[in-house]
Amino acid sequence: MHEIKPGQSIELLKELHILTRDGKMNQDSRRKLKQVNHLTQFIAPLLQEIQQKHADVRLVDHGAGKSYLGFILYDLFFKKQENDANGAQVYGIETREELVQKSRELAKRLGFSGMTFLNLSVAESIMSPDLPARVDMVTALHACDTATDDAIQFGLCKEAQFIVLAPCCQAEVAAVLKKNKGKRLGGDILTEIWRHPLHTREFGSHITNVLRCLQLEAHGYQVNVTELVGWEHSMKNELIIASYKDLPRRRPAQRLEELLHLLGLEEMMGRFR
């Protein structure tokens, strides 16, 4: 089991089905653990950068689901601080109450006292007194469709230092492209890019993430886009890492507006403000 990191909770890995119930590894569990390690290698240096400024890291995982990512990060980076009054805190935000309750029960069973799970919408979480005013990192792993945009909105409102996103299915832009396709086919050569239904879906997915990157840049973030190797859940296995650098905002904001206009997506301007 050399892939397991020193001190990593065997009980947690069993609960997440990364290990079998008897604590062993098979081909499937090795693949899952490889995925986890690949993702955390991108997040680790960001957490270290935050910890150089203050030990009490505040991380919010949006669209947490079963809080797979939050548990792994807490186990690897924060559980040693559990007896520290200024220890790190990981918050899992999820709208499905039954998943929130299961995560609370697992955290209690593992003794992960620095983890909090809240049954909230994004709009509620922005104003919720149960979340800290300062948030250092926002994550969203395979938050489906517009849930990724909701996580971005939360991160921008909280002025998070880092926003880490692995987008999942993205249908909203594709739906608008499809709706407007008939009006544009006759005179706009660009529409050939998404004329066929399969291309509409794929191009809509791609352009959604392009718009998200421009949106983040328009708020002063430096954005890097890379690939998550071996992740099968997301069609494009894309990882977006945004670091707040207070960069110039006017040009990306203009490019965002120009691109929305070029593609006939003006009605979505509010989504990417």
Image: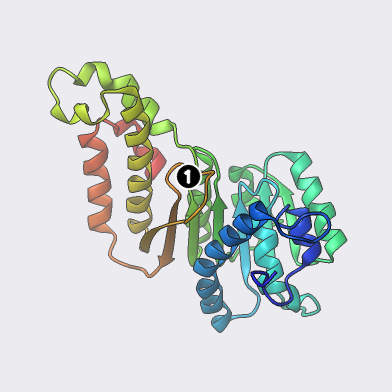
Under tag 1, what secondary structure?
helix
Residue 249, picture quadrant: bottom left
Residue at the (21%, 42%) spot, across then down: 258
Indicate the position of residue 84 as horizontal and vertical percent values: 77, 80
Residue at the (80%, 47%) spot, across then down: 102
Q: Is residue 90 left or right of residue 204?
A: right
Which residue type carries mark 1?
Asp
Residue at the (50%, 45%) spot, across then down: 148
Q: How is the image coloured?
A: rainbow
| The one of 85 and 223 positioned closer to us in this rendering | 223
Q: Is residue 88 visible?
A: no
Residue 109, picture quadrant: bottom right
Total marks placed = 1
Q: Is residue 20 visible?
A: yes
Indicate the position of residue 200 as horizontal and vertical percent values: 33, 28
| The one of 161 and 36 positioned closer to us in this rendering | 36
Residue at the (50%, 37%) spot, across then down: 145
| The one of 236 and 261 positioned closer to us in this rendering | 236
Q: Is residue 74 above or below residue 141?
A: below
**What residue is pinned by disc 1?**
149
Q: Is residue 88 above or below residue 143?
A: below
- Crowd around label 1: few <14 · some 14–19 · many ≥20 (10 Å): many
Report the residue that reaches farthest toward the bottom.
Answer: 52
Indicate the position of residue 29 as horizontal and vertical percent values: 67, 55
Quadrant of the image for the N terminus?
bottom right
Indicate the position of residue 187 as horizontal and vertical percent values: 12, 21
Report the residue that reaches farthest toward the front.
Answer: 27
Q: Is residue 238 left or right of residue 196?
A: right
Q: Is residue 21 left or right of residue 231?
A: right
